[in-house]
Amino acid sequence: MRNVIAISFLAITLSAVAIPATISAQTSLDKRLDSLFMIASNGEVKYQAMIKPADDSIVAMGPTVIPRLVSKLGGKSRYERIAIERILKRFGAPAVPSLLAVLKYDTGQVVERSCYILGEIGDTSATVGLLGTVSNRRWQARESAIGALGKIKDQRADSAVITAMNDTIPLVRKSAAVSCGQLQIQSSIRHLVHLLGDPFYGARMPAAEALPKLDTPNVVQAICDSMPAENQLLGNLGCVVLGKIGTTAALDALTEQAFGGSPERRAHAAIALVTADSTDTRNFRYFYLGYETDPYSRLKVESAIKAVSHDRVESQ
C-alpha cells in the first residue's frame, strides 16, 4: 500500500514539474520567434541585410510557429503584414489549416489577408474554405477569396467565380474576371463578353485579357453575337479582343465592323485590324481610308498605321 502511494505521489510530482517545463519551453520559443520577427518585419534600411537570415531562422523553427505568425495578421504595420505573407508562403501547405481557421472565426482585414496568402500558397486544400468566403458580407473578403481561387486553379471554384461576375461591387467583378482567365473557365465566355460593357474600367479590361485565353472559335462567335448590343462599350472593346485573337474569323468580323456602324465603332475595328495585320496582307488600309469620311476616326487610324510602321522598322 505504501509503495502504491509513493508511486502515485512521484507521478503527480513529475507531472507538476513537466507542465511548467512545457510552458517555459513554449514561452522561450515564442520569445525567439518574436525577436526574429521584429527583424524580419523591420522597414529600416540598416536592417535589410538581416531580413532574409531572420526569415530563414523562422522557417527553420518548423510549422509549430505558424499559429503565432497567423495571430499577428491583425497588426497595423504594413511591414509586418508583408513579412507574414512572405514567411507563410515559404511554409506552404502546412500553413493552410491555420489560415483557414481564421476565415471561420475572424472578421475584417484579417480574413482578406488570409485569403491573399492562401492564394499565394496555391494549395488546393484551401479551396473549400475559400468557397465558404465568397459570400462574405464584406466585399473586400469576397474580392480576396475570388482572387485566391483563381491563383489556386482548382476547377471546383468555377461556378463561384462565374457567379461573382454579377456582384454589385465593381472590384469583385474585376477579381472574378481575372480568375476566369487564370482558371480558363470555358463556360464563362458569354459572361466575360457581357463584362466587356461593364461601366467599371477595372472590370472591363481583365475580361478583355481573359477572353483570348479561352476557346477561340467560341469567343469570336460570342463577340460577334454581342456587336448589335446598345452598349457601345461592349462592341468597341470586343473589337480590341478580336484584334488580339487575330484568326481569320476574327479579322473577318473586324472588317465587317470597320465598314459599318458608328464612326467610333469603325475606328476601333480598323485600329484592331491595323495592329493584328501589321503587314496589311488584306490591303485593308487602302479601302478603309478611301471609305472613311469621319475626320476623327481617320486621324486615329492613320496614327495607328504610323505606329505599326515605326515598330516594324525598329524591329528590323
Image (cartoon, rainbow, N blue to C red):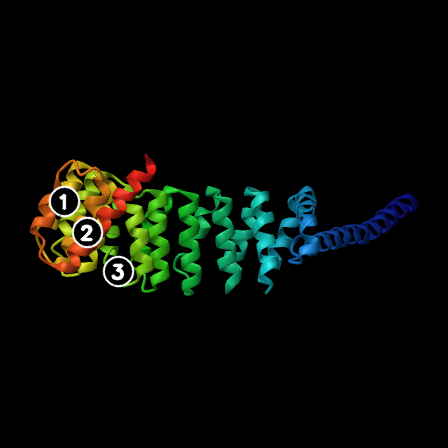
Q: Amino acid at mark 3?
A: Asp
SS for callout 2: helix
Q: What residue sits 46% from the left and 51% below the top?
A: 129
Coordinates of residue 214 in the picture (x, y in percent)? 28, 41
Amino acid on which the number 1 mark rests in the picture: Arg
Residue 285 badge? 1
Say whether marks 2 and 3 touch (CB < 8 Å).
no
Q: Position of residue 259 (x, y in %)?
A: 8, 50
Residue at 68% of width from left, 47% of height from top? 58
Residue 198 shows which numbered tag?
3
With 283 as the anchor, is 205 left or right in this view?
A: right
- Name the mark nearer the viewer: 1 or 3: 1
In the rendered view, does 22 fall on the left or right side of 172?
A: right
Is 205 on the left-hand or right-hand side of 254? right
Which sits earlier in the primary sequence, circle 1 or circle 3? 3
- The residue positioned 9% from the left and 45% from the top of the image is 287
Q: Which residue is mark 2?
A: 301
Does 203 appear above or below 210?
Answer: below
The image quarter in which residue 163 lies:
bottom left
Image: 195 above or below 56: below
Q: Position of residue 293 (x, y in %)?
A: 8, 57
Q: Amino acid at mark 2?
A: Val
Q: Position of residue 309 (x, y in %)?
A: 25, 42
